[in-house]
Image (spheres, rainbow, N blue to C red):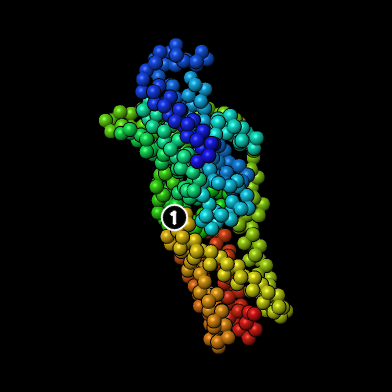
């Protein structure tokens, strides 16, 4: 253990001793700092707030960010605790996230530094003061220090292990015979698919990725801790109560939300959304197929088929891998019916057999059946998926009816 870690542990221990003492023992207001009036019962010795940050340009911040602010004005202690990834958002971040190797952990940052980080990016920060008891504040500070000391080797994903779900669970663990009771809201009873559509509609590529990964559980409801994205959690708290087992009830917030920094960043809509990209791909394939049929442009069609086959194989292997490692906590993916390595295996070992061209017809029939099944299962017409299915269907039928062409090399 180096000197830095020793200093961190000593610092944590001192903070915890101070919080434990002053939250457990009433002190006179004369002991407080001159600029801060301490109440006789010391209930405002520590203040707890949820900080909600508006959406940013990076995919990591597309749904905003959240943190717990713990401050002790008497001793000029003011920290923000948040669950962050080991590396900053970017190309490496996206790659590690997609292969299920992204790790994260709690960090403790001085309040001024935390807010300045988002203020520079034009992201607004809203503070929601949480109405906890003295003992709950004490336990929460100890819990945050405990979580911070665990390091940054815990999993991260956008559904079950992110900046908000982890804070939600940590806050719930320290409640003393109490719990949050949220007012009825459609968000709390939505299916996974509806929730994703409602919260990620401004990030169409993230929405597509999440919907694809969650296809097997599209009709199920998420547990509440996985539904509380930053903005939604803040909105739910404004009408929530803290209810005790003895029937006691008090507002979840100790006061109205406060806008700490204004939102200046306006994230522009993605010009090339999934619908536009896959719509353009479908149009291109239709033109290629017509050129093959009427002008005998077989070379262009063969190159297109090779490209589609490679992309299909890569996506199929990835989806199988993601399902095997239970990426995002998903154990089954309906997309594996269409995107699976079977066509690749058949091509590798049987492409020279006389019956091989029948594979294209079988796969075309599977595509048609799945295009009908998926909207019925999810309750939504997944247009990006349907465009991809239609693209593959056209080329599968073309390959089948023009089987005299040379097989893919």
Residue 49, image x, y percentages: 47, 30
Q: Furthest-top residue in view?
A: 30
- Mark 1 residue element: helix
Residue 163 visible in this rendered orientation of the protein: no
Residue 39, image x, y percentages: 42, 16
Dot 1 crowding, Cα within 10 Å, few <14, some 14–19, many 20+: some
Position above or below: 60 against 22: below
Q: Furthest-bottom residue in view?
A: 354
* Residue visible at 38% across and 32% down in the picture: 139
Q: Quadrant of residue 218?
A: bottom left
Residue 369, image x, y percentages: 48, 70
Residue 250, image x, y percentages: 36, 27
Position above or below: 145 against 280: above
Q: Nearer the viewer, residue 86 or 173?
A: 86
Residue 359 visible in this rendered orientation of the protein: yes
* Residue visible at 45% across and 27% down in the picture: 14
**Side (left or right) of 53 relative to 334:** right
**Side (left or right) of 249 relative to 76:** left
Numbered-mark total: 1
Position above or below: 398 against 18: below
Q: Furthest-front residue in view?
A: 2
User: Which residue is identified by label 1?
Assistant: 329
Q: Nearer the viewer, residue 101 or 260?
A: 101
Indicate the quadrant containing the C terminus: top left, top right, bottom left or bottom right.
Answer: bottom right
* Residue visible at 61% across and 53% down in the picture: 92
Position above or below: 275 against 49: below
* Residue visible at 57% across and 67% down in the picture: 314
């Amino acid at each position: 253990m180096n000197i830095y870690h020793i200093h961190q542990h000593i610092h944590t221990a001192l903070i915890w001793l101070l919080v434990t003492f002053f939250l457990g023992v009433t002190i006179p207001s004369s002991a407080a700092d001159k600029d801060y009036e301490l109440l006789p019962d010391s209930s405002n010795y520590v203040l707890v707030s949820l900080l909600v940050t508006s959406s940013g340009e990076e995919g990591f911040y597309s749904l905003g960010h959240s943190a717990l602010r713990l401050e002790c004005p008497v001793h000029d202690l003011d920290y923000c605790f948040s669950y962050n990834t080991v590396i900053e958002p970017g190309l490496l971040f996206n790659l590690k996230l997609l292969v299920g190797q992204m790790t994260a952990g709690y960090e403790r940052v001085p309040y001024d530094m935390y807010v300045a980080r988002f203020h520079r990016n034009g992201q607004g920060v809203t503070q929601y003061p949480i109405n906890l008891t003295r003992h709950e504040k004490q336990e929460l500070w100890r819990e945050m220090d405990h979580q911070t000391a665990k390091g940054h080797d815990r999993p991260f994903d956008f559904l079950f292990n992110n900046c908000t779900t982890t804070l939600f669970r940590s806050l719930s663990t320290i409640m003393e015979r109490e719990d949050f009771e949220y007012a009825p809201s459609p968000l709390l009873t939505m299916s996974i698919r509806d929730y994703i559509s409602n919260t990620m509609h401004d990030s169409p590529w993230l929405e597509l990725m999440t919907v694809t990964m969650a296809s097997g559980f599209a009709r199920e409801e998420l547990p509440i801790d996985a539904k509380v994205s930053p903005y939604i959690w803040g909105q739910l708290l404004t009408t929530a109560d803290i209810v005790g087992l003895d029937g006691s009830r008090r507002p979840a917030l100790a006061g109205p939300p406060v806008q700490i920094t204004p939102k200046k960043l306006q994230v522009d809509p993605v010009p090339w959304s999934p619908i536009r990209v896959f719509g353009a791909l479908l149009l291109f394939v239709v033109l290629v197929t017509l050129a093959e049929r009427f002008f005998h442009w077989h070379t262009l069609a063969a190159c297109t088929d090779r490209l589609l086959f490679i992309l299909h194989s890569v996506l199929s292997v990835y989806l199988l891998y993601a399902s095997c490692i239970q990426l995002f906590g998903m154990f089954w993916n309906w997309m594996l019916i269409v995107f699976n390595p079977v066509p690749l295996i058949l091509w590798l070992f049987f492409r020279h057999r006389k019956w091989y061209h029948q594979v294209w017809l079988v796969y075309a029939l599977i595509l048609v059946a799945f295009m009908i099944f998926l909207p019925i299962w999810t309750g939504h017409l997944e247009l990006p998926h349907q465009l991809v299915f239609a693209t593959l269907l056209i080329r599968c039928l073309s390959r089948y009816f023009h089987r005299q062409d040379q097989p893919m090399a």
